[in-house]
Amino acid sequence: MTAVKITPTLLAGLALFGFTVRAAGGQAQTAPAAPPAAPSLIIESFGPTRAYVVGKERVTLVATFRNTGSAPLPPDTVTARVYGLAGLDYEGSIFQKLPGLDANSAVTLRWQTYSVRTDIPLVASVGLDVPEQPRLVRVAPIQQFDRPPPADNPGFSPKATARARGVSGVLENERLRARIATTNANVPALFLSARTDAGWQRIGVMLPLTELMTAEGGQQPWWEVFRADRIQADNRATEASLILNGGVGLRWRATLQLTLRTGSSVLEISLRCVPLRPVRLSGVRFMPFYAGERSFGAEISEQMPAENVGQHTLTAMRWNRITFGTLLPNTPLFPDWETVALPEVIGASYRVLGVEMRALNAPASVTPASLVEVRGRLFALNPSSSAQDARRIVQPAKTAPAVTPAP
């Protein structure tokens, strides 16, 4: 074995060029120099400032770009461009130059677009061409209604009651109302309202209700949304349910059940999915709730830090005298998966609640003999003087196996 010893050139070489070692009887060798500092850009968030579009109204797209590198980005060296992939046209230029960005600093840019179609799903994207980096692209689907979703009538049911007609329905009691309306793309949306002394107050919208990232064979996985074929109402002595039957893409049959009890401010949500053929599942987005949309906006009075409660995470915010939030699973659906909170869209007129469960490496193989099930809770407490009141809805918390043999 050749002996190696550190020579006095060590101190001289540390500053910029690494250190020098000398093999006995050999020439001095210098370790490679550290790469120079450089900027590195990411698209931190992208989406519309409104959770959905009505008719051909304007659509403001907002994107945030962050320099995660170790050196500043010079101004006007990188261009951001939005693309209306389906159903959108532009007001003004689609190009914007990024300003100078120090290390770990960010900038938020906006584009004005408008809907030109009401018969197809709207899709937008933003792209960055960064020197010496792969091209960065982020895509955002935008759900659309022909006309504004129905407003809340002032009446209420003293007990839990469900009503359904076609692909719409209402589930309510004396405290909470969940209304299902369907977009132009046949995607059901859940509008949640809480009853106050002044009448019904809309809290936000869940849209879409869930998404799965799936592939089969040699395909690349992509996100597909839950669509309902029909909605059924189930009324019992102390509780009522809306049962949405449908599918996710062409590969899954799915049922989503909403249950509300008399006197309760908590909506129980259960998703059950069965693949129609063997598939590879890479992700699940569950209960994406846009709080404040077309209501009080992104401004809130108080936010409680997320708390892990057993196998669930409790997230709560308070606006005025209403505390609202979610109780969602925090355990992986499969080994080598992770569960993360859905990211905020910086600059949007709503707050985002919900989770994404995703594969860290290889996707999970799911067969038609398996059932994928996820459960969560959506709540709105009124009156409430503190977001800490959300702890009242934790017990008893139901759990469900992630994947079980299908019945």
Image (cartoon, rainbow, N blue to C red):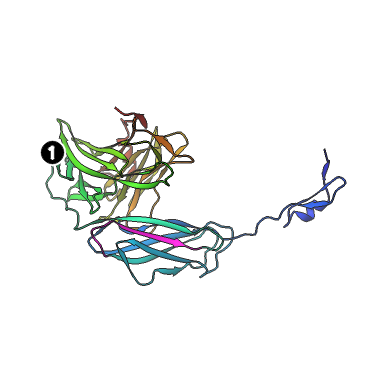
* In magenta segment, residue 122: yes
Residue on which disc 1 sits: 158
The number of discs equals 1
Q: Is residue 219 left or right of residue 319?
A: right
Q: Is residue 19 above or below residue 157?
A: below
Judge whether 67 appears above or below 329 on screen: below
Of residues 156 and 24, which is closer to you in this image? 24
- In which quarter of the view is residue 293 placed? bottom left
| Quarter that holds the C terminus | top left
Residue at the (39%, 52%) spot, across then down? 344
Q: Was residue 241 drawn as part of the magenta stretch in this picture? A: no
Q: Amino acid at mark 1?
A: Pro
Residue 36 left/right relative to 382: right
Region rendered in magenta:
116-129
Q: Secondary structure at mark 1?
A: loop
The image position of residue 301, as x and y in percent, is 33, 51
